[in-house]
Each structure stands twice: as C-alpha cells, then as structure tokens.
C-alpha cells in the first residue's frame, strides 16, 4: 500500500528533487578530471589553489545536499578529499 502524502509534502518534494539533481550533477562534474583546466592551472602556477577551491565547492555542495535531505548530523564525508586531480 502506498503511504498517504499531504499536498504540502508533495509540493516540497517536487521542489527539492530538481535541486538535489542539480547538486548531484555538479558533484559529478567536480569529480570528473578536466585535463584542459588542469594543464591551464599548472601553466599559471595555481594547481594547489584550484584543488582547494574544488574541495571547498564539493564540501559546500555536500552540506547543501545533506540539508535538503534533512540530515542533521555532521557529514560522514567530512575530512575526506574529493579532488579529482590527486
């Protein structure tokens, strides 16, 4: 039997799902190795800064994702490095 859902819960769910999908796509992109950008960063001497910014973006998106999913505890991913360049 299907659980009964209230219209407010259904509306909220519909609004959150595209946001979660967008976050998941952005996380996937951040985890993809982009050689052109990597080479440009190496040429400009900013590889470590690029990795730092990438990690900050991943951490931010994971916090947003957990918030949208209703997770109230600390991220289990906290402290892990998600850089695709390492």
Image: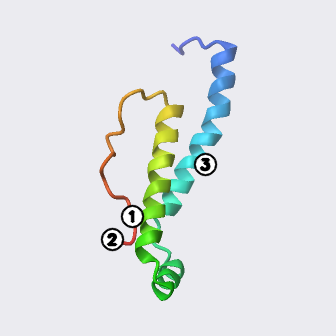
Say which label, 1 or 3, has the lower sequence index.
Answer: 3
Residue 30 rendering spot, x and y as whole percentages: 49, 62
> Does residue 8 lie above or below 36 as drawn?
above
* In front: label 3 or label 2: 2
Where residue 76 appears, as percent x and y from the top left, is: 31, 40
Q: Residues within 10 Å of mark 2 (few under 14, many from 20)?
A: few
Q: Tell me the CA gap for discs 2 and 1.
A: 6 Å
Report x, y in % for residue 48.
40, 72
Disc assigned to residue 86: 2
Residue under the image location 33 percent in, 45 percent down: 78
Count of residue discs? 3
Q: Image point 43% across, 76% down: which residue?
A: 47
* Relative vertical location of residue 33 with respect to residue 18 in this rendering, above or below: below
Which residue is tagged 3? 22
Q: CA distance from mark 1 to mark 3?
A: 19 Å
Q: Which residue is mark 1?
A: 83
For mark 2, give the secondary structure: loop
Q: Nearer the viewer, mark 1 or mark 3?
A: 1
| Image quarter in which the C terminus is found | bottom left
Return the x and y of residue 11 as percentages of the image width and height.
69, 23
Q: Nearer the viewer, residue 65 or 28?
A: 65
**SS for dot 1:** loop
Q: In the image shown, does 33 or 62 lie closer to the viewer? A: 62
Decide: few, some or many residues near mark 1? Use Cα within 10 Å; few <14, some 14-19, many ≥20: some
**27 above or below 36?**
above
Q: Look at 61% across and 36% down and name the residue there.
A: 17
The kind of secondary structure element at disc 3 is helix
Crowding around mark 3 (Cα neighbors within 10 Å: few <14, some 14 to 19, many 20+) is: some
Q: Find out whether the residues at labels 2 and 1 contact each other: C-beta distance under 8 Å.
A: yes
> Upstream in the sequence, badge 3 or badge 2?
3
**Left or right: residue 74 compared with residue 4:** left
Find the distance from the CA under tag 3 to the CA under tag 2.
Answer: 25 Å
């Amino acid at each position: 039997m299907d659980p009964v859902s209230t219209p407010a819960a259904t509306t909220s769910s519909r609004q959150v799902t595209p946001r979660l999908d967008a976050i998941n796509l952005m996380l996937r992109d951040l985890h993809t190795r982009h050689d052109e950008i990597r080479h440009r960063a190496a040429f400009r001497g900013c590889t470590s800064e690029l990795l730092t910014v990438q990690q900050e973006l991943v951490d931010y998106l994971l916090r947003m994702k957990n918030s949208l999913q209703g997770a109230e505890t600390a991220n289990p991913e906290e402290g892990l490095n998600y850089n695709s360049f390492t």
